[in-house]
Amino acid sequence: MTVLSPLRALVAAGCLVPFAGAQTTSTSTLRLNEVLLTQAGDDTAEFIELSGVPGTRLDHHYVIVLEGDAPEAGQVDQLWSLHGHIISDQGTFVIGGPNVATANMLLSDAARDAGQHGWDMLESGTQTMFLAHIPGIGTARSIVEMIDKNLDPDGDGLTILSLHPRIELLDSIALWDGDAQDRTFEFARLLGPVAGRAPAGVQRSGAGAQLWCDDRFLGPLDLGTPGLPNPMTGCTGTTVLAGAPPGYYSSINDTTSALLRATLHNVIDDHTRLPYTSGSTDTWDVLELAQENPASSSQIIDVYYNAAFPKGSGSYNREHTWPKSFGFPNDSTSNYPYTDCHLLRICDGGYNSSRSNKPYRNCNPGCDEEPTFLGGSGTFPGNSNWTSGNFDTGTWQVWAGKKGDVARGLLYADVRYEGGNHGGTGHSEPNLILTDSQSLISNSQTGSNISTAYMGLRSVLLQWHLDDPVDDFERDRNDMVYAFQGNRNPFVDHPEWVDCVFHGACVVAEAVNYCDPSQLNSISASATMDHFGSLTVADDDLTLVAFNMPPNKFGFFMCSLTQGLVLNPGGSEGHLCLGGQIGRFFNQIQSTGLFGTFQIPIDLGALPVTPTAMVLPGQTWNFQAWYRDNIPAATSNFTDGYSITFD
């Protein structure tokens, strides 16, 4: 498995926010729990609530609010020091409101101008809120210097908060009022707009640690009791999640197909089983949240007809995308695939009946058309489902917009269910295998629960995965199922793993520091490099980062296909770690700024060697940053080298 730095590993895992440094015991349970903004009338009742273990000290913790409205997007709007406060016996700490404890406020533009308090200054426009842990007196002093600073001057959505090695971002949430030119930052989960505004308030739901919903309140406020968990009344807005939690995939080994399959199985195995139908939380509850219409929280969108139905209308039922007749037809508390919501989809009743238990195959123009709500074209394939035959020898081709969703659900099943016993309950589980063999599929239909069952067609589903990439609806669905079951579909979070698991194409991208540590600079630090984004050439989404440099110096990045070592070139304090033909990013000269760091996005199609070069999959390129320094007189220095093998 590729060994990633903490910064890269968390970004690669799809986290809400990239962290810098390891979490400490005291901060690992802290999170933003609730935010309430007033949008009309009295503007003195806003608050931000944190939750955590009672008695946890909040020394060296900060809440930072970044403006999202153009043209000030990226500027620090409010900043509170929580030093000296603790989490209450109720497990919360509240910032704001005239009758609750107010932390030390370091900045509010409007408060400073109007002589008002910080707790009546949370605006209803676009903003991103961070909970940060920043140890050390020197670093804390630099945080105070953020006042009036724009933390995202280049407008790429990545701020100094995630790049600084001493700043640990524990949580974030972004509220958006719908203006296209506005910005949110880092990987904060976005909520809004509601009726052309940012949500009046957001809170975490008790259904899952990563589950948020927005309170769509637009009239007089009913605050409940600030300081108690989730004081807002009701949670009637859209539910959303923040992606895979930090470290969820940290045990994955993707060097071979067998190792990736085994380590993925270990991560997603042994999930919490929900009842199929129950007076308590059951699969209906999960599916109606997982397939909620993004435009209306009172509706669902079904999988095949693609229509919006009112929740609870009776117009839809539940579809087993892996038909239960193939291996697990008899429901019981020991039957895990029967109620697995990664395999269940809300479906128009007529379409569920028409699909029956037909395997997924590619149809032809002679098949019967089953149009989506948008209408049929009469021309194959159009915007329709297509079907022929009956039962296990029949064919069902999913319409283009849901091919990949269905395929990735069955690919998940092939890895999740590999026989053996559930690690928590001890119940035996089937081995579910995707195949192209019609006889194996047909023989899986015995009328009883069996130990090994087959479904397909494997080759068709693998192609559908490519034809229909992951979208936001599918990501949100994965989040919601995870909130209840406790396991995720890894092929939604990491679709690139399909090639390794099912095709054996396990090209492993790698980024490593070499020629390190670099020479100490004038702040007695060794400057180093890291990256954000993807190491896959086709994504063309790579940003180089250099940090631990002296503040307010200029510098630039360099690249080469060759590593080297030149000691103190041109009288530099540092060493050049590149050889051969060296490209210099002179057109992207940067300032290290207040925190001694800079970053640039890299165009993988035109690296600045002579002539310009296109990065190819499998190539290894080497990078380094040069910067001005003074030890003791004006000179220069280098970061360590950074070697990237692309896939």
Image (cartoon, helix red, strand yellow):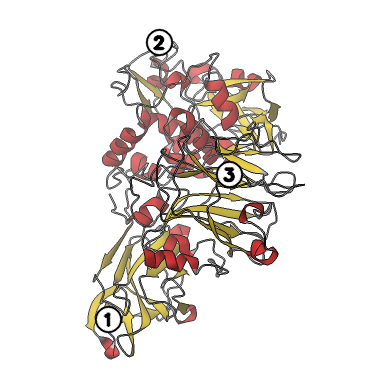
Q: Residues within 10 Å of mark 2 (few under 14, many from 20)?
A: some
In this view, the mark in front (1 or 2)? 1
In this view, the mark in front (3 or 2)? 3
Residue contact at pointers 1 and 2, CB within 8 angstroms:
no
Query: Which quadrant of the figure has residue 501?
Result: top left
Element type at mark 3: loop
Q: Which disc, if any, is residue 446? A: 2
Residue contact at pointers 3 and 1, CB within 8 angstroms:
no
Amino acid type at circle 1 is: Gly
Element type at mark 2: loop
In the rendered image, residue 409, in percent from the top left (x then y), is placed at 47, 32
In the rendered image, residue 151, in percent from the top left (x then y), is placed at 53, 66
Query: Which quadrant of the figure has residue 595?
Result: bottom left
Residue matched to label 1? 574
Q: Residue at x 67, y 54 (%)?
A: 123
As drawn, the residue found furthest toward the front would be 99
**How far, Cα to Cα, is label 3 from label 1?**
53 Å
Residue matched to label 3? 100
As drawn, the residue found furthest toward the top would be 447
- Identify the mark nearer the N-term, 1 or 2: 2
Q: Which disc, if any, is residue 18? A: none
Q: Residue at x 68, y 18 (%)?
A: 314
Res 541 visible: no
Question: What is the quadrant of the C terminus in the image?
Answer: bottom left
| Residue 316 in the image: above or below residue 505 | above
Amino acid type at circle 2 is: Thr
Amino acid type at circle 3 is: Val
